[in-house]
Each structure stands twice: as C-alpha cells, then as structure tokens.
Amino acid sequence: MDNFNVLSGSMGDFLHIPGANLLNRTAAFYNWQQARRQAGLWPYGRSTENGPHSRCLARTDDGNLFEGVNFASQDYLSLSSHPEVLNVAIETIQRFGVHSAGAPAFVGNTSLSLALENKIAEFLSADHIILYPTGWAAGFGVIQGLVRSNDHIVMDKLSHFCLQQGARAATKNVHFFRHNNLEMAREKLEKIRASDTENGILVVTESLFSMDSDSPDLKALQELAHEFNATLVVDVAHDLGSLGENGRGHLELQNMIGKIDVVMGSFSKTFASSGGFVASSQRSVKEYLRYFSSPNIGSNALSPSQAAIVGKCFDIAASGEGVALRRKLMNNVMLLRQLLNDSHFDTYGEPSPIVSVKIASEGLARLVSRCLPTIGLLSNLVEFPAVAKGAARFRFQVMANHTNKDITDGADFFRMAMAIASIEDETLKSGAIESAEQRLKSNDPQLETS
Ligand SMILES: Cc1ncc(COP(=O)(O)O)c(C=O)c1O
C-alpha cells in the first residue's frame, strides 16, 4: 500500500492490516490520513463552534477555523435550536439533574422516558415502544436481540452500518439482496425456506436510504416477508418526522402506518437528540428486547433531558407547526435539487432532506472537498467504503431553517468548488505539475512512512 496515495486508496485498504501488534498496525492508516490531512484532503472529524446552525463556524480536525453555510448537520426540522425545545431542556435539567444513571433494564428510565414511549406509540400507531440510548444501539440491538445463530437475515445491501453490525453479531447466516431489489430478496427467502423451515428469518431494510435518498416498496416487502414466515424490520431514521404531510415518513406516504412488523428509528436527525427506539405491536417483543437486547442491559438510558427534548420534538412534529416546517424543508429541498441540476449535477433518488450529489471519482471529490472551507460551504464527502467504489458523492442535508440565500449560496459555492477542483484534477492527470503525492514525499520529511 502506497502511504502517500492521497487521491486514491480508501479507508477500506486499512481494515485488514497484517502484523501481530494491534496498536502498531494502526500506523499505516495514520500515515495515509496524515498525508491527506497535510494536503488539505481530510474533510472528516470536524466540529462546530456554535452548534449545527444553518450558517456556522466550524473547525477542521487539524484546528483551522472557517465559516460557512452548513449542509452537513442532520437537524432536518431545525428543532435543535427551537425555543420550546431549549426551554424544556433547561426545565428538565433543573428538575431531574443531567443524567439517567442507570440502564433501562434497571432504574435508568424516568417518567419522561415513559411519557416519550407513549408519544411515539401514538405518533406511529404502534402499541409498544422501547427506547435506546442511540439510534445505532436500536439498530444493532433489535437484530442482536431477536436473532440467534441458527436464524437467517435477509438484508438490503445498503442497510445502515448498525444493522449490518447487528446482523454479523447475531448470526453467520446473513444474505444480502441488491438494493431495493425485491425479486432478489424473494430468491434469498425461497432458497432459505427450501432447506430450513425451523429457524427464524429477519428481513431488514430502511424506509429512506441515507446515501441514495430512495425507498423500497414497503407493502410488497412486508407481504413477501410474511409469505416466508419471516419478520420485517424497517429503519425509519431519516424520514420519520421529516417527510409526509403528517411527518410519518414513508410509512405514511406508502399507507403502511401500523402495518410493519417492527419499526426502528433514531432521534438524531429530526428529534434533536441522541437516542433511538423500536416499535412493535407485541408487549412480549418489548419485554424480550429489554432483557435480551444488549444495549438495554449494558448501557445507560437516555438522560431525562434527552427524553424531554425528544418528547417536545414529537409534539412539534405532530402539530400544525410541524406541517409548516416540513413544507419549508421540502421547498428548500426542491430548490437545492433544481439549482444543482441546473448546474448539470446529478442528484440521487427522490426529494428528501438528503440531497446527494454525484461526483463518482474519489480523487476529484477529495479535491472538491479541499475547496469547500475556503469558499464557505459545509457538505459531507461520502466515499468508499461508505458507498461503492467510484460512487463518491457529497451529501447535502437540508434543514427547515435554511433560507433561500443559504440554498442559492450552497449551490453556487458547490459549483465554484467543482470548477476549481476540475482544473486541479485535469492538471494532475496531465502530469504537468508534480502530483500531490510527490509534493508530499519531497516536502515533508517529518511525515512518518513506517
Ligand atoms: C439509517 C440510519 N440508521 C441508524 C442510524 C444511527 O442513528 P444514531 O445517530 O441515532 O446513532 C443512522 C445514523 O447515522 C442512520 O443513518
């Protein structure tokens, strides 16, 4: 592996590194990351100085401050700074303190978490809700909690990492089907049931895919699962609260509210807090998960203020104000997609708060990412292995509080970054100037090369 391969190579190259010393094995990745960082090509690990506002002051992971229009935060209805949400957080901290100080299986829940469970149950027309400390824990935990080693998992290939990790932790029998390809899901189910009618099957998908902004046919998938005595779990992390006139996401848009076996979600996109949940129609599922889904035993519950914040966000999402915020959000989404498309960028999928812009080449995408802080734009670069090789993209996450100027600036700044990066890319390809890799090699004696 070439340590200085800053415009190609990927994090995937460092997943399996030979060597007996676990700590020393990390050096190869660090060297590659340093080379990218020093070339201004490491756009990850950033922080904001004033929170995820639509314009914010941010810091690169090597400490440089920059200001920009922010399309890199997931606060779709802009509720993280809503005055009522702030008030409820302050009041709750004064009354309950700041910490849950216990796992949900013991005394980690408060009256606020129980009230939140009821609110979510009502919002989703589901009977039983169990809360988790993060959406990640909910995704991992629902699979690890329900599935045993002889069972099978039939999963959309692009399912979120937490679902894939939960599946790997639960069983070796994980079968992937091509993204949103129900025919292939059927083939997998047929094959499993031809030789195994004894064990369980969990079918796993998302209602709005977080990189492609597309959705499966939920009704058809639920029927397919039942045809093979399988259970369907759907991750609604991105569309719950943010899509559909009443905020029930694709469950609402596809007339599937209350009709999916198990729904799992996160609060971290629309509900202004870390946390997640699992919903089902059976009390036994909730009780089983409370004691057999590991995050509920071995991890502390949502803090009281998180439960209160999420509860208030559900109130707003269910109200007339929620309807207005979603309309504003969708107007912003449509405007951004249109401006990007007018500039000949391809946007993935269907209109949703996720506007993914196709770049394809990782090298070009990294050069674009290098221009963004100077130009004043925050948008996340997504590259392999988070998406397929050669499918690099920028993910704009749109918020209700973005103004028209934020949106037009976002599209203009991105076009400028692309124009600069394309010239750099052409120049590098033509070999007319020293490559970034060569520059790094010759100019940086301090760079570790071990
Ligand atoms: C589809 C999906 N599921 C689950 C999660 C995990 O949610 P959280 O951020 O609440 O841990 C995410 C977050 O990135 C997600 O995109």
Image (cartoon, rainbow, N blue to C red):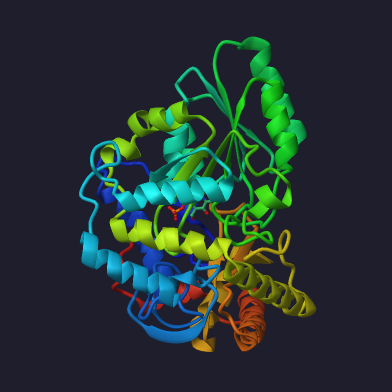
| Left or right relative to 350: residue 240 | left
Residue 67 picture location, percent across and down: 45, 87
| Left or right relative to 283: residue 401 | right
| Left or right relative to 432: residue 348 | right
Residue 291 picture location, percent across and down: 33, 30
The quarter in which the C terminus is drawn is: bottom left
Which image quadrant for residue 102? top left
Q: In this view of the protein, which residue sits in the foreground, 233 or 174?
A: 233
Residue 15 seen in this snapshot: no
| Left or right relative to 76: residue 355 | right
Q: In this view of the protein, which residue sits in the foreground, 361 or 410?
A: 410
Which image quadrant for residue 169? top left
Vertical order, 366 against 26 (above or below): below
Vertical order, 56 against 86 (above or below): below
Residue 90 seen in this snapshot: yes
Residue 49 picture location, percent across and down: 35, 80
Q: In this view of the protein, which residue sits in the foreground, 123 or 354?
A: 123
Q: In this view of the protein, which residue sits in the foreground, 395 or 335?
A: 335
Vertical order, 385 against 331 (above or below): above
Residue beneath the point at 45% across and 75% down: 82
Residue beneath the point at 31% across and 74% down: 445
Q: How many marks?
A: 0
Residue 253 picture location, percent across and down: 72, 52
Vertical order, 353 against 70 (above or below): above
